[in-house]
Image (cartoon, helix red, strand yellow):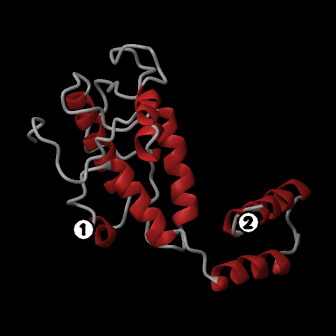
Amino acid sequence: MNTNTPPSNRNTNTSPSNTNANTHSSTSIDNNAHPLFLHNNDQPGMVLISKKLTGYENYASWKRSMQIALSAKKKLAIVTGEFVAPDVSSPLYAHWCQVNDMVITWILNTVNDDISKSMNYMDNAAVVWNELSESFSAVSGHKFYEAQRALFKHEQGNDSVEFYFHKLKGFWDELRALSPVIQCTL
């Protein structure tokens, strides 16, 4: 990868509002708390989570698992766009490109091959993340109906109270995740 000129899809916006996002951690990139720190064990072939994104039916669960894994790696700010690409003249630009490419491979390693084929040429982790969100986060009325139906049909049967409640809570969490967020605008 040539780091002298930015590829067209890389976000190199360094306006004052975005510059502050990149300085949210005053630690050195050699410190494991910095979003651009890569541990010696961080490899492109690493699979952060075992579940593969197959489509809208498991997107919510996949996304949550990836958020947890990326947060544990301190790379969530890369996909959310909170830590944008520094200016190409910045000494951090090459490090950002390396981490960005690593995060892209981690994401692509956890999606179905048919999905990853369409994303192989994207070169910004936040763009990949947003593309997946736009493609698979739309909740169909059918999926919401199926989740409600599973909840209403669920019976305790021979399950312990604890196990029954655990399954109920899982249904409630799924419905909450599937419910559209209604924003009040005044």
What is the x, y in percent for residue 75?
Answer: 43, 36
Residue 80: assigned label: none
Considering the numbered disc 1 on the image, is that residue within a helix, a strand or a loop?
helix
Mark 2: which amino acid?
A: Ile
Mark 1: which amino acid?
A: Lys
Give neighbour class at mark 2: few <14, some 14-19, many 20+ (Cα, 10 Å): few
What is the x, y in percent for residue 120?
Answer: 22, 60
Give neighbour class at mark 1: few <14, some 14-19, many 20+ (Cα, 10 Å): few
Considering only vertical position in the picture, is 121 above or below 66? Answer: below
Q: CA distance from mark 1 to mark 2?
A: 34 Å
Considering the numbered disc 2 on the image, is that residue within a helix, a strand or a loop?
loop
Side (left or right) of 131 relative to 156: left
Judging by the rendered image, the residue that carries numbered circle 1 is 117
What is the x, y in percent for residue 25?
Answer: 47, 20
Q: Quadrant of residue 160?
A: bottom right
Number of numbered discs overlaid on the protein picture: 2
- Circles 1 and 2, Cβ within 8 Å, touching? The answer is no
Residue closest to the eye, 134 or 30: 134
What is the x, y in percent for residue 128?
Answer: 35, 57
Of the image marks 1 and 2, the number of the one nearer the N terminus: 1
The residue that appears at 78% across and 61% down in the rendered structure is 186
The residue that appears at 40% across and 40% down in the rendered structure is 78
- Which one is closest to the eye, mark 1 or mark 2? 2
The residue that appears at 38% across and 36% down in the rendered structure is 15
Extreme residue in the bottom direction: 142
Considering only vertical position in the picture, is 184 above or below 46? Answer: below
Quadrant of the drawing holding the N terminus: top left
Judging by the rendered image, the residue that carries numbered circle 2 is 182
